[in-house]
Amino acid sequence: LISIKEKLNLPAIIGPVIARGQDSGVFRKSSSPVDLAAGITNTLLMRCFTRRQNSPQDNANFVAELLLDGLGVH
């Protein structure tokens, strides 16, 4: 069986965006883009599995707001 990670590697999609944000000073550089992308992916998947009654869009919006506010430079 092909795993979800092989079919849709979310960290590989998110990581470069984080790297660009870090390079431009939008995101702080406290962790590597790879680690942050994995954490975001894990958070999103956990949210989807534990909040199945919510739409995918609602779960994605929740995680995006939570994490992007936490990644911003203060």
Image: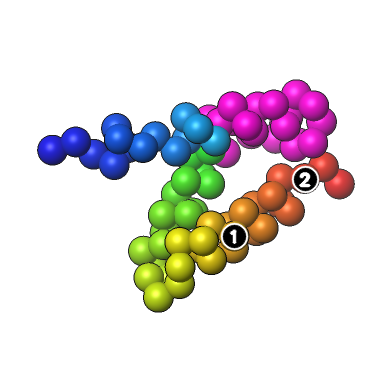
The local crowd at label 2, few if under 14, some if 14 to 19, many if 20 or more residues have their Cα within 10 Å, is few
Question: Taking 55 as reference, is 12 above or below it?
Answer: above
- State the image coordinates of residue 67 (x, y, percent, origin top left): 64, 52
Q: Amino acid at mark 2?
A: Gly
- State the separation of the CA atoms marked 2 and 1: 16 Å
Quarter of the view holding residue 48: bottom left
Q: Secondary structure at mark 1?
A: helix
Q: Indicate the quadrant where residue 64 lies.
A: bottom right
Residue drawn at x 44%, y 49% as measured from the top left? 42
Name the amino acid type tagged 1.
Asn
Q: Is residue 47 magenta?
A: no
Q: Is residue 42 visible?
A: yes
Q: Is residue 45 above or below residue 21?
A: below
- Report if residue 26 lies within the magenta region: yes
Position of 15 relative to 49 (above/below): above
Residue 53: % across, % down: 40, 75
Badge 1 is on which residue? 61
Image x and y of residue 50, in percent: 39, 69
* Residue 35 visible: no
Tell which residue pokes out farthest to the bottom in this image.
Answer: 53
Q: Residue at x 73, y 29 (%)?
A: 22
Name the residue carrying label 2.
Answer: 72
Q: Give the residues in magenta.
A: 15-36
Name the disc covering residue 13, or none: none
- Look at 69% across and 50% down and name the residue there: 68
Q: Which one is closest to the eye, mark 2 or mark 1?
A: 1
Instruction: Please name the predominant secondary structure of the magenta segment in the image.
Output: helix
Q: Marks 2 and 1: CB-CB under 8 Å?
A: no
Which residue is depicted at the point 69% across and 26% down?
20
Please state which of residues 63 and 70 is positioned toward the viewer in this rendering.
Answer: 63
Disc 2 element: loop
> Coloured how?
rainbow
